[in-house]
Amino acid sequence: MPQWLIYTLASVLVCALVVGAAALRQRRVTDEDTSETPDVLEYMVMMVGVVYAIVLGLAIAGVWEARQAADDTVQREAQSLYEINQRLDVYPAAFREQVRTHIDAYARHTVTSEWPEMEAGREPDAKGAALLARVRSDLAHREPADELQAQAYQPLLDQVAAADDARHQRIESAGSTLPGTVWFGLIAGGVVTLGLLYTLQIRRTTREVVLATTFSALVVFLLFLVWSFDAPFGRDGLDSAQPLLELYAAGG
């Protein structure tokens, strides 16, 4: 299901519950004194709202930082493979073609096979590691034939090591950023924050209902934002795989 549809359905559902609760209370409570709201209720609502806003802000900052780190990891992995491609110019054409074919196979497998597994929360199989090991083997077992190849030999192996390190970091960070207890707190806090709106002795006018609905939609949007960024490599699509996708497209 597309993310925009999930957000739309969640917003419509929460806003409908808010409007329904306001209408039901207005119908059932006819003799409520709305001339004054106790100061303690206003203080409680304010404090709960401020605390929840801080927690929500920290959650957004945390998942955003994890998303940025994941993007940097993919960029570093793709850049290392690109550097290998570029440094192969000192080798014969047949060897260059062999290594670039293996790099292309690795990039193809990463984009078409590993990415769907990571999006589904599953650990990718060992084929990607085997494909990268094949690139390492190609370079490690190629004895330099001249001074230029000797100078390029160790930097090429260093780039393979950098790509391997980035690959391991990518797989390790593919899961959810926030633990379940944090999600429970965010959802429960949202319910409590919205629920406290109805402890205030306010008139259920159209303006107040619209404001409460807008506030509810904002809370849903922020929770949806956290949920979307909670997957460092995205919930759907290959946007986060763009550096590797470009490498694979260039190789193909």
Image (spheres, grey):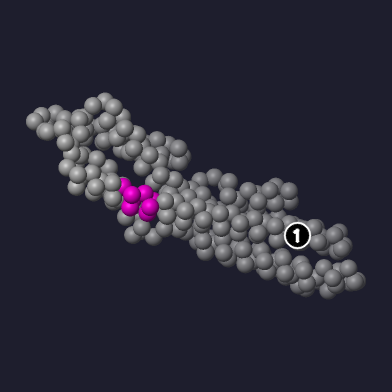
The furthest residue to the right: 146
Estimate how packed mark 1 is, as few (under 14), some (14 to 19) or many (20 or more) residues with alpha carbons within 10 Å.
some
Residue, x 78% and y 72% (percent of image)?
A: 154
Q: Nearer the viewer, residue 70 or 46?
A: 46
Q: Quadrant of residue 29?
A: top left
In the rendered image, residue 74 lying in the magenta stretch gets the answer no
**Picture coordinates of residue 127 (x, y %)?**
60, 63
**Residue at x 42% of width, y 36% of height:** 5
The residue sitting at 32% across, 55% down in the picture is 185
Instruction: Identify residue for label 1.
Output: 83
Residue 69 location, quadrant: bottom right
Establish if 113 lies above or below 20: below
Is 249 left or right of 1, judged from the image as shown?
right
Q: Which residues are magenta?
A: 49-56
**Residue 34 image point, x, y percent:** 15, 33
Q: Is residue 13 visible?
A: no
Residue 112 position, x and y percent, is 59, 51
Rendered location of residue 144, percent (x, y): 85, 72
Which SS does the magenta portion mostly show?
helix
Q: Is 25 positioned to the left or the right of 243 in the image?
A: left
